[in-house]
Amino acid sequence: GGSPLTLEVLGVTALCQVEKHSPSVQPKESGTVDVVLDTSELSAPGECSIKLGSNDPEHPTAVLQLAVAPQTVLKAKPGFARYTYVQGEAEGTIRQLVSAKDGKDFRVLEVKAPPEVRASFRAATDKERDSQVAGTQWVVETTIRADAPVGPLHGTIDVRTDHPEQKLMRVPLSGFVRPVLHVTPPQARVGEGHPAPVPATV
């Protein structure tokens, strides 16, 4: 058209952040929208979108979409930690066998997890190792706490390493902690009441 095009960011989904954009584009010129896609939270293919608004009467909105398929070097088996747990019961432990696809030696430096679980790591024993994988292998253990609060589990188990190609690996955590006893419905509501008259005794 013959007038400047104005642009504004109307919304951004998770993982994406608009670093900067051209608020106005002159006729016969072009503008840019610089988007940063944070892949550190990705353990599987994902995508994000950016919704833009403009003063173009025919196209007042436009959606930019970015998709990413992370190529990880480190792998964990099973690769997820899911708990269905009753509060106060015997604690349950899930073990992850961590190795490198390129067969390089590496060390696990630290493991962090949400407060509902305890996390530890150690070198895998000969019996625990995957014989099909070369290089060092590690066992990361997460144990659900007996006093974990009732409710859904979510977050990630962050495994930090000294591998030159991948310093951080995230293992998804999910599940639910249930109470020992549960009342349905949790509340009892009683409507308005009127006391019955008491007959007098003479």
Image (cartoon, rainbow, N blue to C red):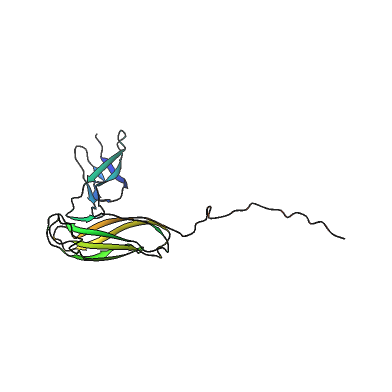
**Quadrant that contains the C terminus:** bottom right
**Residue 52: quadrant of the picture:** top left
113 sits left or right of 134 in the view? right
**Residue 102: quadrant of the picture:** bottom left
Q: What's the residue at 46%, 60% (across, down)?
A: 180
Does 109 appear above or below 34? below
Q: What's the residue at 23%, 61% (across, down)?
A: 159
Q: What's the residue at 55%, 55% (across, down)?
A: 187
Q: Nearer the viewer, residue 75 or 46?
A: 75
- x%, y% of residue 154? 35, 56
Q: What's the residue at 25%, 49% (across, down)?
A: 44
Q: Nearer the viewer, residue 187 or 28?
A: 187
116 sits left or right of 138 in the view? right
Does 56 appear above or below 70? above
- x%, y% of residue 47? 26, 46
Q: Nearer the viewer, residue 75 or 94?
A: 94
- x%, y% of residue 60? 31, 37
**Quadrant that contains the N terminus:** top left
